[in-house]
Each structure stands twice: as structure tokens, then as C-alpha cells.
Amino acid sequence: MITSSIKYEGSFRTTAVHLRSGEAIVTDAPVDNMGKGSAFSPTDLLATSLASCALTTMGIVANNNGIDIDGASAEITKHMASDPRRVVKIDLTINMPSDKSYTDEQKKLMEQTALNCPVAKSLNAELLQNIEFKW
């Protein structure tokens, strides 16, 4: 089954539609690459996907192990290089809810889950993934 369809809207903008749900994502080229920067750029989505995947897989493992991570959040910084233009580093900070207590075993389980999420394992080994957890 096709996952999504994407249409080029002109002026460096696309609309991607998730076919199963009908949800849409708009992308725009970044300001430093001829765009308006009015939406996620494709490389923003790449970096954001790492964080979303980490939190999602943590949620699945947490749910299966009776661990409450509701309220966890993430902050992403994407670092670009040129020639060729590409993402070279992603700084990801995962903030765990401060109103909850976690054992060392639970922390290790959540950290290993995030570090080994499918997106993390799919990215080029040359792309530096700097992942920090704040408990």
C-alpha cells in the first residue's frame, strides 16, 4: 500500500498527504536555500522524525512495561553542511517529566529504546546523532 502522496505546489513548497488518515504536512524550502521558511523543510522533517520516532518507541515500550512517560518532550537542533548540502548532525534532547520518578533500570530501558528506534537505525552512519536525556 502506498504510504503518502506528495504534490509540488510551486515556489519551493510541497504538500504531503498520508493516504490512510488524510492528514497533510506542508513543507517549504528554508530561508537559507531560496525558501520562505514558512513550514518544515524536508531536512527539518528528517531531524524531527528522529525525535518523534524516539518518543513513539519509548511510549510503546513504556506502555508494555507499566512505565508512565506521558508529558515527555523533545527539542531538536539540525546542523547543515554544504557541498553537498546535507544534514551532518542532529542534537536531540529528550525531556522526561519532572513530576515522575524512574528507576535506573527504567531509565536505561527508555534510553536504549530511543537510541535504537527505527529512524535512528535508518540514518546514514556519517550523520552524528547527539542524543541527551534529561530526567
Image: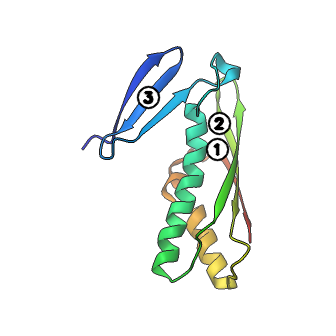
Residue 82: image quadrant is top right
| Rendered location of residue 114, percent (x, y) | 58, 64
- Amino acid type of the residue that numbered disc 1 sits on in the rendered structure: Leu
Label whose residue precedes the other's in the sequence (1 or 3): 3
Q: Give coordinates of residue 112: x percent, y percent.
A: 60, 70
Q: CA distance from mark 2 to mark 3?
A: 22 Å
In the rendered view, tell whether residue 117 sits above or below residue 108.
above
Residue wearing tag 2: 87
Residue occupied by mark 1: 127
Q: Which residue is mark 3?
A: 15
Circle number at residue 81: none
Quadrant housing the N terminus: top left
Q: Residues within 10 Å of mark 3 (few under 14, many from 20)?
A: some
Residue 9, placed above or below residue 59: above
Q: CA distance from mark 1 to mark 3?
A: 26 Å
Q: Earlier in the sequence, mark 2 or mark 3?
A: 3
